[in-house]
Amino acid sequence: MQQAQIDRLRSAAIPAQQLFVGGQPMTAISEARLDVLSPIDGRVLTTIADGGAADIDLAVKRARRAFDEGSWSRAAPAQRKKVLLRFADLIEQHALEIAVLGVRDNGTEIGMAYKAEPLSAAGTIRYYAEAIDKIYGEIAPTGRDVLGLVHREPLGVVGVIVPWNFPLMIGAWKIGPALAAGNSVVVKPPEIASLTLLRLAALASEAGLPDGVLNVVTGRGASAGEALALHMDVDVLAFTGSGAVGRRLLECSARSNLKRVHLELGGKSPNIVFADVPDIKHAAKVSANGIFRNSGQVCVAGSRLIVQSQVYEHFMGELLVATAKLRVGDPLDLTSDIGAISSAAQLRKNLGAATRAEAQGAKRLAGGKQIRIESGGNFMSPAIFADVTPKMDLWQEEVFGPVLAVTRFDHEEEAVGLANASSFGLASAVWTGSLSTAHRMVRAVHAGVVHVNTYGGADISVPLGGFKQSGFGRDKSLHALDAYTDLKTAWIAL
């Protein structure tokens, strides 16, 4: 990846985008459209179709027809594997083009976007392609006069709603296992970051995925998203996003056909540093990246830093140095460490959280201001607030921006109490040189992921999901297949 290649792609015109339904681009039935604003300079990049309930209904019907016809759902596992591997190869071949397109759409720095979006998506699709012919049913331990078989079957039509921070990566976490299991899929992308998922659907068709098996309907959450959640012919809904929307989707399930709903609802993840941390400078650098990369727009971001008193001053000094070295700039410039906030609305929310933290008594150590205003884009300096207490909003509420809450602790039990003083439970981290401490903390911290002496980096081989109000969905790993398959028992008298 070279800067010259990026610069050529960044200026390419983006044509007006259509829905992708039944294997081809389609105009929204209402013909309504939404502007796509670049977070880099605030200008209109292109427009997308503003799909609604009628478009969702058409996409679900095409998905159901494809499922019932069986060209994908009843295809031999080896055939599905072949198509998905070709699909993954095509994503990789177009990786830089897709990454630049996504950065222009949502502002993630290109170095992160290239790996986390197209390359990650390709790896995810390939992982589930390879799993297709390696997942077996079961033979029950019955008496000799009976044969008990447990089959895995696809559920039918899967609805997918993804967030704007990593739409391709998170989309692939759901699309990959759903397709591998033989389902048809209807995706509702985020209205402010739809471009890469439309490109993904076109590449899937090029790879040989039958028409109607993967459909993308762009539009607003209140119209297209809710219509997908309420549709009587959607069998399962997979969602990553806010708790408020997650609750609404559960209500939609109850109001419609009781479709299964899998929710990953974000977090307020604690990052705990013990006095025996092996390398303070390294831990501080990783911790800074763990909250500030992609402008803090990461569901597992380490947004609550809890440092033992004996090393608090030393660690905070190193953290401030590491943070000061992070360059906020044009996300399509390879020298930028942090890109743009995804939207003007999100920037206002972030700045409001910083202002409120200071008003509630937190001590501002760095940042929290809008910068690069002359660019017309959405940029913010990384913010660090000390002396944050569990009663403050900044401790309890997910900002989803580059704003870090910091406090200190004296004893392990206090660290556990502070870590668990949250309604969220998605991710966490523990820095210690003691194996015993590490194991005790893995058990004690209420989170779906506990990093030890690192932050982030868990690959597709392990599940991602949370406890408490972080939801109950699980993406990644072979466990994700459970969300998109059903168990059928055959009880055969011999």
Image (cartoon, helix red, strand yellow):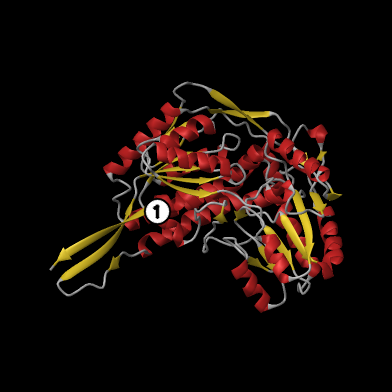
Q: Is residue 102 above or below residue 223?
A: below
| Residue 232 in picture, x, y percent from top left | 36, 36
Q: Is residue 21 above or below residue 485?
A: above
Q: Residue at x 54, y 56 (%)?
A: 465
Q: Residue at x 74, y 35 (%)?
A: 348
Q: Nearer the viewer, residue 91 or 252?
A: 252
Q: Nearer the viewer, residue 230 or 375?
A: 230
Q: Could one spot residue 18 in this view of the protein?
A: no
| Residue 303 in picture, x, y percent from top left | 71, 54
Q: Residue at x 19, y 74 (%)?
A: 143
Q: Could one spot residue 240 in this view of the protein?
A: yes
Q: Amino acid at mark 1?
A: Ala
Q: Which residue in the rendered view is the most extreme toward the front?
A: 391
Kindly indicate the quadrant of the structure image that contains residue 339: top right
Q: Quadrant of the C terminus?
A: bottom left
| Residue 378 in picture, x, y percent from top left | 74, 37
**Does dot 1 land on a helix, a strand or a loop?**
helix
Q: Is residue 52 above or below residue 478?
A: above
- The 10 Å Cα crowd at callout 1, few under 14, some 14 to 19, many 20 or more, is many
Question: In this image, 143 relative to 434: left or right?
Answer: left
Kindly indicate the quadrant of the structure image that contains residue 356: top right
Which residue is labeled 1 in the image?
180
Q: Nearer the viewer, residue 122 or 108?
A: 108
